[in-house]
Amino acid sequence: QMPVSSPTRDSTDRASHRKEPNVKGRIEFSVQGHTLSGITVCPISEGNSDFNTAENSCKTGLYLCKA
């Protein structure tokens, strides 16, 4: 989770609508069974087919890390 305290505004937006920030991150793990460095990584939303815990592979998506 990354807290964002101040909204950004698009310069063309005259109605003061909030624009969601585009947040990207990179985390490197060492593989140990079905967990990565002792942290279980799973998709944050149900039905995300771009995640496979059996092979420890991740693709672009929203993930929740549990320690």
Image (cartoon, rainbow, N blue to C red):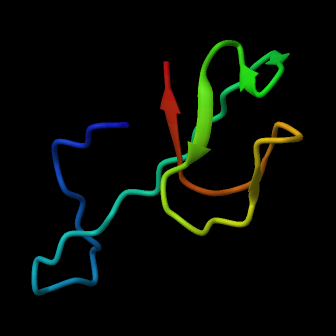
Q: Residue furthest right?
A: 55
Compared across the picture, whether 11 is left or right of 29 comes to left
Compared across the picture, whether 22 is left or right of 6 comes to right
The N terminus: image quadrant = top left
- Front in this rendered view, residue 28 or 4: 28
64 w.r.t. 59: above or below: above
Q: Residue furthest left?
A: 15
Residue 19 occupies quadrant: bottom left
Residue 41 occupies quadrant: top right
Residue 48 position, x and y percent, is 63, 65
Q: Residue at x 49, y 61 (%)?
A: 45
- Front in this rendered view, residue 9 or 23: 23
Q: Residue at x 72, y 66 (%)?
A: 49
Q: Residue at x 52, y 64 (%)?
A: 46
Residue 47 position, x and y percent, is 59, 69
Residue 4 occupies quadrant: top left
Compared across the picture, whether 51 is left or right of 12 comes to right
The count of marks equals: 0
Residue 66 position, x and y percent, is 49, 27
- Front in this rendered view, residue 15 or 48: 48
11 w.r.t. 26: above or below: below
